Image (cartoon, rainbow, N blue to C red):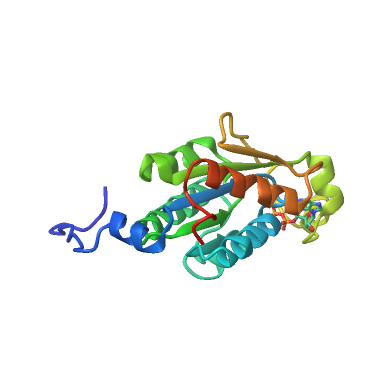
Amino acid sequence: MGKSKHITWHASEVTKSERQQRNQHKSAVIWFTGLSGSGKSTISVALEKALFAQQVHTYRLDGDNVRHGLNQNLGFSPEDRKENIRRIGEVSKLMADAGLVTVTAFISPYKADRDAVRHLLDEADFIEVYTACSLTECEVRDPKGLYQKVRSGEIAEFTGVNAPYEAPTEPEIILDTETLTVEASVSKILDYLQKHQYINTAQV
Ligand code: ADP
């Protein structure tokens, strides 16, 4: 429950459906989850670019970027991680209402938190994408040098090493990033969006 009393929902006179009609595609929240270094940022950047090139109204929310602003007061304790995902879920909901295809790239380690976002959104809007990659391979990649810092004790509570990661049990899409190229991963998501009629590239 929120802290504010005496607040009323004020409905807009432009509906989500009207926005989707104008955009010529449906809303969606493409929610990446996976270990640090599994490829969420890399693939989400390439996906956003590919969607934009196909005239899709799209926007990407990325873990580190959001922590610079909206969530700058949050750390990495379980409570803060939960609140981080809750806020991003609420922002995603607004973006879905605005008719956008939002792409989010957050470790989002707890299943319950991801499920909470799934249930917050309209059912069809949530597409969970699991970037599956072994911890060993993520450590080899170590694109931000974070695993090295964890191993030297500079970072505590790091997902996959000394903080839990709960892999999705029924994600809409699994990307095995140890075998799929970035381009193949993007194609797999675009195929899903077309097959389920979120976007229709024949029209654009
Ligand atoms: P995350 O956002 O999940 O922390 P990043 O996208 O920041 O992961 O880092 C993934 C790293 O792995 C990047 O340096 C990327 O170039 C590299 N990489 C190598 N092969 C792949 C692949 N097949 N898919 C995605 N990333 C890959």
Q: Position of residue 202 (x, y in %)?
A: 53, 55
Q: Is residue 90 visible?
A: yes
Q: Position of residue 156 (x, y in %)?
A: 70, 51
Q: Identify the image quadrant of residue 19.
A: bottom left
Ligand 1's image quarter is bottom right
Q: Position of residue 112 (x, y in %)?
A: 48, 36
Q: Is residue 164 above or below residue 184?
A: above
Residue furthest bottom in the image: 69
How many callouts does the rendering have?
Answer: 0
- Residue drawn 46% across and 56% down? 88
Q: Decide which of 76, 22 is in the foreground and name it.
A: 22
Q: Is residue 47 left or right of residue 13?
A: right
Q: Identify the image quadrant of residue 191.
A: top right
Residue furthest left in the image: 6
- Residue drawn 56% across and 30% down? 170
Q: Decide which of 95, 85 is in the foreground and name it.
A: 95
Q: Is residue 112 left or right of residue 35?
A: left
Residue furthest top in the image: 169
Residue furthest front in the image: 202
Q: Position of residue 72 (x, y in %)?
A: 52, 66
Q: Is residue 67 visible?
A: no
- Residue drawn 17% across and 61% down? 10
- Residue drawn 49% across and 52% down? 199
